[in-house]
């Protein structure tokens, strides 16, 4: 039997390296589409120790030809589309570009698959942000969408075009409707990582305060390494499908902050927190909490890491990271 091969777009992001590691451990050959940047952006692959085990192919979701080229080069049996402009606040600043990459980019991937090899199985990184102004609680695969940001709107397009290629051409295409998932590899602009990093820096006297928006906002947060397993499971099913992937719990930003400061022994967290309205969203989403019972029943998937463990893991990792940076700086000076 030929070896499984996978192409991952967004391999330099948070989820890409975790998924790549999972697939490598299962014996896959893994390639990743990377866009050119003026400085190399492979730090997360390096942190997981897999930089030399994946093949990197230059390309961009804005350029259909480069996707065709990547498929030609690595001949994947599975295609995971994780790339896109993924930061919700940024999507109000660059709504057109967000639509180009996060919506139309998916059609470019699907067209490439349809034209080159319709047997390739396709995973689309859909998002709980599609529920936005939530029409019911908790949200499941049957909850109607009401996106509240250009990002959410683009994701709704991606969701439906993924289903459309399944229905129009019989492609094996699946959507994972993932609720927020975090890890030490999360970008610093995302709230949980912003908190874990600020807490680490405050505990080391490198920063004075944590500027934050709505302390009472609630989210359903899970661990990225658990969630990539659900992506893989979807593509192993005989039939494609759409699945909510979530922890099924919500926590407030305040709870997250309290746990994070507690981890470094600073129990009087309020002393360090500055509420700044600049960090409020123009249109806030309602209570997003996922019902992942379909994923549990059909894929046998459930999260392994709980909320407290996740927050503490992120704080610990940031303390180590900041200490290392400090040591390097002190050695240089
Ligand atoms: P991320 O850390 O922001 O990574 C995004 C990746 O997409 C990066 O590798 C980025 O490359 C790449 N990318 C952006 N625009 C591109 C383009 N035009 N062409 C090629 N690559 C491009 O996102 P993530 O947290 O790993 O999330 C993965 C996917 O899941 C995203 O589509 C996100 O919207 C979706 N999602 C995430 C969550 C979550 O909570 N994390 C929840 C639901 C859905 P550079 O490194 O060059 O910028």
Image (cartoon, grey):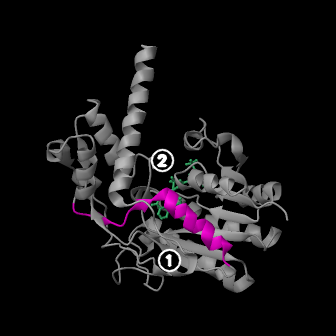
Q: Relative to residue 59, is residue 226 drawn left or right?
A: left
Please, is residue 298 above or below residue 18 in the view? below
Is residue 19 in view from this perspective?
Answer: yes
Pick out the residue farthest to the top: 333
Other residues around mark 2 within 10 Å, as few (<14) / some (14–19) / many (≥20):
many
Q: Relative to residue 34, is residue 307 drawn left or right?
A: left
Residue 89 x/y as whole percent? 39, 57
Quick one: label 2 or label 1, which is nearer the N terminus? 2
Q: The residue tagged with tag 2: helix, strand or loop?
A: loop
Q: Quadrant of residue 230?
A: bottom right
From the image, tell me which residue sits under label 2: 185
| Ligand 1 in which quarter | bottom right
Q: Relative to residue 291, is residue 63 drawn left or right?
A: right
The residue stretch that appears in magenta: 216-237
From the image, tell me which residue sits under label 1: 296
Taking the spot 64% from the left edge, 63% from the top edge, the residue there is 80
Q: Nearer the viewer, residue 231 or 126?
A: 231
Q: Which quarter shows the N terminus?
A: bottom right
Spatial distance from mark 2 to mark 1, Cα to Cα?
26 Å
Q: Which mark is residue 311?
A: none
Mark 2 vs ligand 1: CB below 8 Å:
yes
Please, is residue 156 above or below residue 262 in the view? below
Residue 292 x/y as whole percent? 45, 76
Q: Relative to residue 299, is residue 283 drawn left or right?
A: left
């Amino acid at each position: 039997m030929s070896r499984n091969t996978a192409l991952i777009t967004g391999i330099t992001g948070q989820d890409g390296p975790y998924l790549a590691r999972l697939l490598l451990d299962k014996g896959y050959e893994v390639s990743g589409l990377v866009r050119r940047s003026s400085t190399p952006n492979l730090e997360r692959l390096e942190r997981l120790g897999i930089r030399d085990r994946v093949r990197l192919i230059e390309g961009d979701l804005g350029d259909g030809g480069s996707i065709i080229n990547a498929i030609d080069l690595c001949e994947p049996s599975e295609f995971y589309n994780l790339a896109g402009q993924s930061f919700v606040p940024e999507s109000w600043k660059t709504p057109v570009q967000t639509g180009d990459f996060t919506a139309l980019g998916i059609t470019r991937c699907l067209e490439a698959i349809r034209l080159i090899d319709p047997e390739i199985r396709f995973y689309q990184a859909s998002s709980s942000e599609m529920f936005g102004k939530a029409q019911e609680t908790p949200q499941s695969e049957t909850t109607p969408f009401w996106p509240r940001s250009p990002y959410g709107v683009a994701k709704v397009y991606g969701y439906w075009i993924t289903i459309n290629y399944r229905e129009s051409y019989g492609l094996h295409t699946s959507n994972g409707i993932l609720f927020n998932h975090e890890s030490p590899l999360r970008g610093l602009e995302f709230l949980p990582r912003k908190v874990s990093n600020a807490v680490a820096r405050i505990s080391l006297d490198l920063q004075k305060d944590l500027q934050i928006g709505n302390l009472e906002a609630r989210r359903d947060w899970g661990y990225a390494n658990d969630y990539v397993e659900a992506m893989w499971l979807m593509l192993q099913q005989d039939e494609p499908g759409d699945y909510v992937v979530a922890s099924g719990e919500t926590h407030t930003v305040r709870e997250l902050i309290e746990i994070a400061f507690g981890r470094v022994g600073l129990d009087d967290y309020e002393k360090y927190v500055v509420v700044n309205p600049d960090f409020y969203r123009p249109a806030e989403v309602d209570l997003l909490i996922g019902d992942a019972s379909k994923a549990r029943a059909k894929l046998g998937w459930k999260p392994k890491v709980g909320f407290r463990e996740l927050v503490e893991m992120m704080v610990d990792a940031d303390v180590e990271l900041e200490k290392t940076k400090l040591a390097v700086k002190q050695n240089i000076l």
